[in-house]
Image: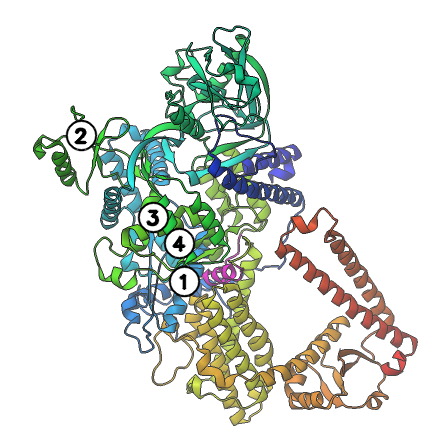
Amino acid sequence: MLLKRDGSIRSRCLSSLHQLLQLWTRPGPWAIPPGWRASSDSRISAQNWTQLKNKAEKQKRQHKRLESIEAGVAQKSAVPQRRSKAWVPKDVVLYDIPTAPGQKKDTSVPLPASYSPRYVEAAWYSWWEKEGFFKPEYQSQQPQRKAETFSLCIPPPNVTGSLHLGHALTVAIEDALVRWHRMRGDTVLWVPGSDHAGIATQAVVERKIWKERGARRQDLTRGEFFSEVWKWKEEKGNEIFQQLKALGASLDWDRACFTMDSGFSEAVTEAFVRLHEDGLVYRAQRVVNWSCALRSVISDIEVENRQLQGHTMLSVPGCPAPVPFGVMVTFAYKVEGEEDQELTVATTRPETMLGDVAVAVHPNDPRYLHLHGKMVQHPFTGRLLPIIVDPMVEQDMETGAMKVTPAHSRADYELGKVHGLPLISVIGEDGSMTAECGDWLQGLNRFLARDKVVSALKEKGLLRSMKGHAMVLPLCSRSGDVVEYLLKSQWFLRCEGMAQRALDAVALGHLKFTPKFHEKNWSTWLSNISDWCISRQLWWGHQIPAYQVPVTQSRGLEKDENGVLWVVGRTEAEARKKAAGILRKPEEEVELVRDPDVLDTWFSSALFPFAALGWPHQTSDLQNFYPNSLLETGSDLLFFWVARMVMLGQQLTGKLPFSQVFLHSIVHDAHGRKMSKSLGNVIDPLDFIHGATLQDLQGRLHGGHLDPLEAAIAAEGQKRDFPQGIPECGTDALRFSLCSHNVQGDDINLDVDAVLSSRLFCNKVWNAVKFTLKALGEGFTPQAHSQVFPCSLMEQWILSHLYNTVAYCDQWFGEYEFHCIISAIHSFWLNKFCSVYLESVKPVLSSGDQFQILQTCQTLLTCTDLGLRLLSPFMPYLTEELWQRLPKPDTGSFPSVCVASYPCADQLAHWHNPEEEANFLLVEKVIQTVRNLKMTYQLINLRLPVFLLCLNPASRVVYEEYRDPLQTLSQAGSLKLLSCPSEVQPLTGWVGSRVNDHTEVYLEVKGLVDPKVKLTQLASQKQKLEHKLSKLMAQTQTQASNYQEKASQATQAENWMKISNLQRKLANLDEAMDRLHCLAVIQGTHPLTTDK
């Protein structure tokens, strides 16, 4: 182990881990310190200031939380971590019966002894697919069909990679909804697809070509590069679909689409042309976000603003050594004609001063009134720069004078337009300095030029100071590169009008969000939206259908800011015809040059809800399933994807693409950190499904694209988090575990134990159904559920709880409260059916009373059948494997549980019996009290005589009615009901406990417990519990480290629950010790007398 061999190596790794967290695991925009103002090279417009500030403050809190988490992780790394539950690897049982793809699985053979995911998940999916269960055409022909339609599209994953746990959560939620609607009888369409992922795919294929042939993209023609990408897509691109199938996603694969397919490409072209014809797409020269690493424009929401508190060294792509940031450089401009006069300015980007064209001051700043209208001289170019006045200048910040660089700052660009200033670009697309800087800087990397400029200023005596300075550093979320602001001619989409319609849709209630708090974010972002730069300087993607028309004449022609005439057409022929009409010349004489740029990937993704259904053609799918019923995705895609779908959907189709939006939480690791390859905490869902050794996990690190340092740190993270690898849990357990979290609340911290617990639950269900099948025997003929009327009290109790569970599921599915559904189903199976009902009927099944046996068997079958149907949307494989083996009615049976009717509370209302539920609550409290007594005195497996003293006549009647299950479930050797305290006078050598204000229980422990020995043991237990309680109470004090501010609501609630449990255990111990003291003092005296 690296950490054990060398402590210094461990320290370096943890230090590097912290650095990588800063570089690669950025929560987003961070806070702006009080009094901070961006330098002249990083200013933002006034209207966006509040939005950025709020966003930044939020992310500062997130960053502090992340640092706290990482500190905890580092501290724990020195201590060997063990799983909370000891996991013994199970024997893997394989389904080895020859079954052709699409053929139904053989369920005539006996079930394996215990649940094995590989056995259960074999063969089912291909049969579901072949039978057409996932197609709306199948559902529309079913007897339980309804008039309602439910449609949605899966957020198309990038074709480049493999699914991660965030995708798995999306699939688990959407598939549960889809299967629920399908079982309810709705006509359901769930459309699969994948995104061409322009930047990511191009990068992957470029690396592949370089690795295989030593060639760069530029060494190939565009057509040759496209061929390479398509070849790669055919080889690797379908892996995503296979993973979706492994997750059990019931998608209609015949309708699968890829955003670069011919039909989808037609839709993208049509959208661009229509938007251009509507005047919404235009070409303009603007200062844009430029990634020098990608050589492309990126959108505002692809920029991550990182807060620096001062001088900070950061690694930048393309730079051999770390680069200093967060340094404010103050230098002087000499006033022309006045040698003793100078004007000082401050900037964090001194290399841009070569592009300065003016110095601005506030018109009312008394320090500079005498300089109004004068000029300063540029020390390197000799240019004369005017001193301009503008009220936007903040005179109390830094020197009160600011350098104006319109070609490299958005704020300066707007200022330059107002004052008619020239534009001088001094940084090129590759991040090197341009010829405008002079020979001494031309071709030099921008950050190397920074040092050279500062040195030159110092030599000329113009450098006034350099000091650490808090600033916001814009970073490319795609490449980690520092964003450069460059002046470029690009295609833009006007968003203001579309954004207003999107706001109105929410305000009028036509578009609803779950959780509702996202509406505030929606309003804030759309109210401050700017035009969207939709062009990208890539090869892989939808080439913009715009053509440059070389012309010599200029009168009467509508050209862009650079004097270029552009025409847009669905085809080159259409564009040529348009150009010919504009130029009034024959088409054959028109020369066209197509724009080489491609459209932003998010542009095509925004069309997915309707383009995937055949738009712009009026297909039957578009008519039947558009608008979609729902859009479900991660909350991090609210602006990237959801807002753009709504805007373009309304603009191009005249309809909202969906009426409801459900945004789920983001999946983090067990420590609360974002998933990051460089941390080694990114888990492939298939690792949870099939299991993975630590060696498997680390082998992928070294086979990926991480640099050696990242790979080493990631490997250490994996050793700490998965020392024994990841056990095989299966698809159903993963889906169930993901949905068990409150996906509408805080981010989800998923760990291996949570998924493993769900696998253990699968085994519980497995054994319960095996028990039921054994009880039913061969040839059992079931009744229809609506015809089942319970006879015994336990049957009434269990079926009433089953009714409640059905009602809860129906309610919470409609409210997207999946964790509540999971809790209800889990509680029914585990706490009601398995732990109580199954145990209570074992004596009945062996009693020989055929009538009671028949009634019990029918109830067992009813519970397992409906219980499996309730569970099916979350655990499709397990429920299919078990449900297929249940006996079915002679008529009206379904071929699969996935198309069987979902339980309906209205049809089961005759089971609702709240009176018996309340009665059995009394019984359960007695049972629990007896079990607690046995546990306290370590007599769990002994069947001891039990006396039950009850002073309330009504309750005593209930106990009498439930005598048999009470004795069975409390594992009592005998049970005697007493109604008067005098009846317990002869009892000696007994211990007891109070159940409630009218009931007490007593166990005979004479000869089984040595009071003195037991008191010593309990005293030790009490001391340990008191220590835990004291420690936990100290942590949760309001004054302790601002606990209430730092700890999340979920953490606080969890801690208070722990405190409550500890206090309850201590109270039980105190009571037990009191009883033992009595036994020790007066052996042979009954408990009541001793108490007195």
- Secondary structure of the residue carrying tag 4 is helix
In what element is the residue under mark 1?
A: helix
- Judged left or right of residue 1052, residue 457 is left
Badge 4 crowding class, 10 Å Cα cut-off, few under 14, some 14 to 19, many 20 or more, is: some
Disc 2 to disc 3, C-alpha distance? 37 Å
**Residue occupying image coordinates x 52% and y 40%:** 50
Tell me which amino acid carries mark 2.
Gly
Give 600 or 123, whichever is nearer the viewer: 600
Where residue 605 is drawn, which disc sits there? 3
Q: Is residue 159 visible?
A: no
Q: Where is 795 relative to 736, above or below? A: below
**Picture quadrant where residue 126 is located:** bottom left
- Which of marks 2 and 1 precedes in the sequence? 1
889 lies above or below 524: below
State the mark number for residue 175: 1
Amino acid type indicated by mark 1:
Asp
Instruction: State the residue in front, 473 or 512.
Output: 512
**Mark 1 or 3 closer to N-term?**
1
For the residue pair 625 and 142, the one nearer the viewer reads as 625
Q: Say which element carries label 2.
A: loop
The residue where tag 4 is placed is 504
Which is nearer the N-term, disc 2 or disc 3? 2
Q: Quadrant of residue 105?
A: bottom left
CA neighbours of label 1 inside 10 A, class few (<14), some (14 to 19), many (20+): many
Task: Establish if 1022 lies above or below 380.
Answer: below
Q: Mark 1 and mark 2: span between their CA atoms?
A: 57 Å
Q: Which mark is residue 556?
A: 2
